[in-house]
Image (cartoon, rainbow, N blue to C red):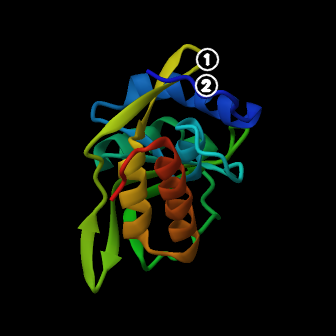
Amino acid sequence: MIAPASIDTRLMATLAGLVPIARVCFRDPWWVIGSAAMRLAGVDGPEPNDVDLLCSARDADTLVEAWTAHRDDHYRPADDGRFRSRFARFAHLPMPLEVMGDLEVRVAGDWQPVQVASELRVEVNGHAIPVPALSEQWRILTLFGREKDLAKAARIAGLTTVRGLHVH
């Protein structure tokens, strides 16, 4: 398990709010992905604006049921036609939390499931937070294919080159 050197206090507090409900609601593997996962894995860059959570549809439904009062039903994600999932956004934590159950991305007209093959466990306030390994983060961001995701993937590729790791 790794412990990142510096994590934004809002991100730490959001993850602290997630862990207890994850223990209750989640029966399947789950991961923090996106910018928050990059920060947790030690990639410098812009601070995340939210926490993206990848999980099964079953666990997403359970979380939505548990946090119904906190759901932001007015929020609509950008690029809605490129992604599909059991999506919900919660706004009661220091940072918004977006859950994506059974996330799929449209690539060349076909839907591809977003899966994590290897992970890291990052210690935050004594809790193990699962995030995709850097090579998996690179692969997922590349799969997403949006300009902002490709820029993040390039940041990971640059970091891993410096550290002597291989992401391709």
Nearest to the observer: residue 111 or residue 74: 111
Upstream in the sequence, badge 2 or badge 1?
A: 2
Residue on which the image places disc 1: 125
What residue is drawn where x is 63% and y is 64%?
A: 75
Compare residues 112 and 150 and report the one nearer the observer: 150
Residue at the top extreme of this rendering: 126
Q: Position of residue 53 (x, y in %)?
A: 47, 46
Density class for disc 1 (Cα within 10 Å; few <14, some 14-19, many ≥20) is few
User: Where 85 falls versus 42 (above or below)?
Assistant: below
Amino acid residing under circle 1: Asn
Three-letter amino acid code at disc 2?
Ala
The kind of secondary structure element at disc 1 is loop
Camera-side mark, 2 or 1:
1
Residue holding disc 2: 16
Q: Are marks 2 and 1 in contact (CB under 8 Å)?
A: yes
Q: Residue at x 61, y 17 (%)?
A: 125
* Quarter location, residue 94: top right
